[in-house]
Image (spheres, rainbow, N blue to C red):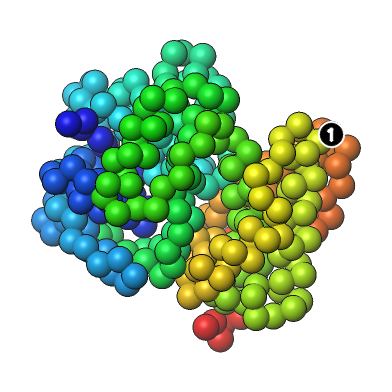
Amino acid sequence: MPRICIVGCGAVGCLLAGFLQEALGIPPVCIVRRREHYEALKKEGCFIEGKIARTVRTESYMAGELEEGSCDIAIVAVKAYDAKAALEEASRLSNTLALASNGFVDVKPLLNRGIRVLGVIVEYGVIRKGDNRVEVTGLGRLIIGSYRGGVKDEAEQLAVILSRGGADVVYVDDIIPYQWAKAAVNAGLNAVTAILGVRNRVVTENEWARSLALRAAEEVSSVAQAMGIRLPYTPGDYVLEIASKTGLNKSSMLQDVEAGRRTEVEEIIGYVIKRGEELGVSTPILKYLYMLIKALEETGGRVCHTGRR
């Protein structure tokens, strides 16, 4: 039975922990950085509510407490801007890592060191309600795959385990095209909902929001194509599919704006804009969305509409 650790047990981490506990029959290992987060998980575990209801009893540690090589697979489920440090912590625990963060994270230094890395894309709608409480507002899939065909056995193994735990899992040979497809969704859906201050359903209900989200997604697709990456889905259709499945969800970017936290706009939209500039691909919609999100960050979200629904 593999020992699977999760570095970062926030909304996505708790969701994955629930699937792992159901599959393996043992408390999953959670590694966190904040003391209050650790104490809540240690004392009570993690409560999953909404469309999936489970209580997850966790084996919890503060970062740095576990011995080297303690895990067979270490899943990193943190914000993209924290992923570099979290991956380093995870690489101390295991030589096989699974990155389950939004946005683009450079894993080449890890691959160059001989560390096996696979990717996990989370389509479920999840809202963090507290240090150890999350709400699943929309059901989706977990897409699991390796980078350019490496680590195939480990990716398949993790896919089987999570599927056994009740997750809807899709295994793919190459995760990179799917990461770009998810970036198209994040650029359109997350940014538009964060700016408007409303839930994901706005993209299916409002023609102006829908048009903006679809144009943003198309720009992401254009940059990917210029890089020689073919998206597995039509970007507009994928945005509408995810918006429909997670209509009651508050996107992670909206949650960050409402809490006055840093968003992942730099690691999602900012990254695509930079690649577009290098390749001569115009991304005017993405640049406007980027600037608006940065304005919300710097004002603590205070310019956001207060009548959110």
x 50%, y 60%: residue: 252
Q: Outermost residue, bottom direction? A: 307
Q: Nearer the viewer, residue 82 or 229?
A: 229
What x and y, as percent, mark residue 211?
77, 70
What x and y, as percent, mark residue 270?
69, 46
Residue 84 visible, this angle? no
Q: Nearer the viewer, residue 171 or 71?
A: 171
Against 205, is 95 above or below? above
Q: Nearer the viewer, residue 257 or 207?
A: 207
Against 51, is 263 above or below? above
Q: Which residue is mark 1?
A: 279
In the image: residue 281, left or right of residue 232: right
In the image: residue 216, left or right of residue 35: right
Instruction: Give the number of marks.
Output: 1
x 32%, y 45%: residue: 162
Kindly state the secondary structure of the residue where label 1 is placed: helix
Against 200, is 277 above or below? above
x 49%, y 21%: residue: 150
Against 73, is 54 above or below? below
Q: Quadrant of residue 75?
A: top left
Q: Outermost residue, top direction? A: 113
Query: Alpha-carbon neighbours of circle 1 within 10 Å: few (<14), some, or many (≥20)?
Result: few
Q: Nearer the viewer, residue 141 or 33?
A: 141
Residue 139 visible, this angle? yes
Q: Quadrant of residue 108?
A: top right
What x and y, as percent, mark residue 152?
44, 25
x 84%, y 34%: residue: 279
The amino acid beneath tag 1 is: Leu
What x and y, as percent, mark residue 4?
25, 35
Q: Quadrant of residue 40?
A: bottom left
Q: Which quadrant of the rendered structure holds the N terminus?
A: top left
